[in-house]
Amino acid sequence: MEIPYLEFITLYALRIAVAIAVIIIGRFIAGRARDFMKKFLDRPEVDEALSNSVESILVRLVYYGILLLATIFALAILGVPVSAMLSVSAAALVIVAVALRESLANFAAAIIFLIYQPFRLGEEIETMGKRGIVKEMQLFSTVIRQSDRSLANLPNGDMQKDGIINYTRLGISRVDLAFTLKYESDVDKARESIMAIMTGDDRVLEEPPPAVVAMNMGENGLEMQARPFVKYEDYDPVQFGFRQQITEQLTAAGIEPAVQQRDVRLDSLE
């Protein structure tokens, strides 16, 4: 009777030793994986796309995820049924997935943003009717600073559905300056005057070339648009400065911009 008892003690002592070894090895692998993840996230193209808080969360997910796998493996060595652990884990994952389905969609979008990088920190984007500088990309949302210095926190999943316009990536932007001329105005003279403004400014790029185009025959006159291409950092100065210059140049050329007008007719009640 003593021999089976000793064999039982020896067997379980060996299992406990192996389980402890698995946890120690798992912890070692988790540490190495954490270090590798930190190095990966420190790469410039990745670091520019993620904020420090997101990087910290991803590093912890890798570390504790491997520890969890090592713990499950160690419990299996001790005799805990693997099927039972997997069933409980699967049920818990289903419950969490249903409860957090919107958050999971936002998280999946964050992963897609990380892989394909439609924007990076510091770039100006437009999405969901909001335009501003990307300040932080979190696991479930992205924070952008708008021109009025307000912060917009936008869900990643909705951003992916709506689409993203990146104004910074190519380094150049087209400034659209709309103005309206009276129908009796000399359009060619107006176009030459405005082209002189754009070609005489060093901030306007030669390629793509600037243009003055007719957009629409409106109620008040011919709706036109000046389209200079500039470097991204010159967009706002050119946009606000050219508006005044166009008005002054047209006035100096004897061309009066059209103003909105409406004919009102009063009928007598008698």
Image: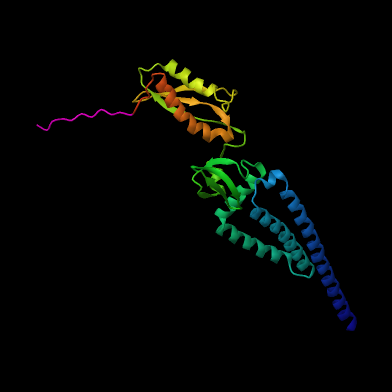
Image quarter in which the N terminus is found = bottom right
Say left or right for 25 vs 65: right
123 vs 83: above or below: above
Most distant residue in the front direction: 252
Image quarter in which the C terminus is found = top left
- 262 falls in the magenta region: yes
Give the x, y percent position of residue 208. 58, 24
Say left or right for 102 vs 178: right
Q: Residue at x 50, y 23 (%)?
A: 197
In the rendered structure, which segment of residues is drawn in magenta? 260-270
The foreground one among 121 and 99 is 121
Give the x, y percent position of residue 86. 69, 62
By what rule are the colours in the image chosen? rainbow
Give the x, y percent position of residue 124. 57, 40
- 187 falls in the magenta region: no
Give the x, y percent position of residue 65. 71, 59
239 vs 250: above or below: below
Most distant residue in the left direction: 270
Q: Residue at x 62, y 63 (%)?
A: 92
Q: Residue at x 71, y 64 (%)?
A: 83
Quarter occupied by residue 204: top right
The foreground one among 237 and 84 is 237
Can you see residue 248? Answer: yes
Most distant residue in the bottom direction: 1
Can you see residue 163? Answer: no
The foreground one among 257 and 14 is 257
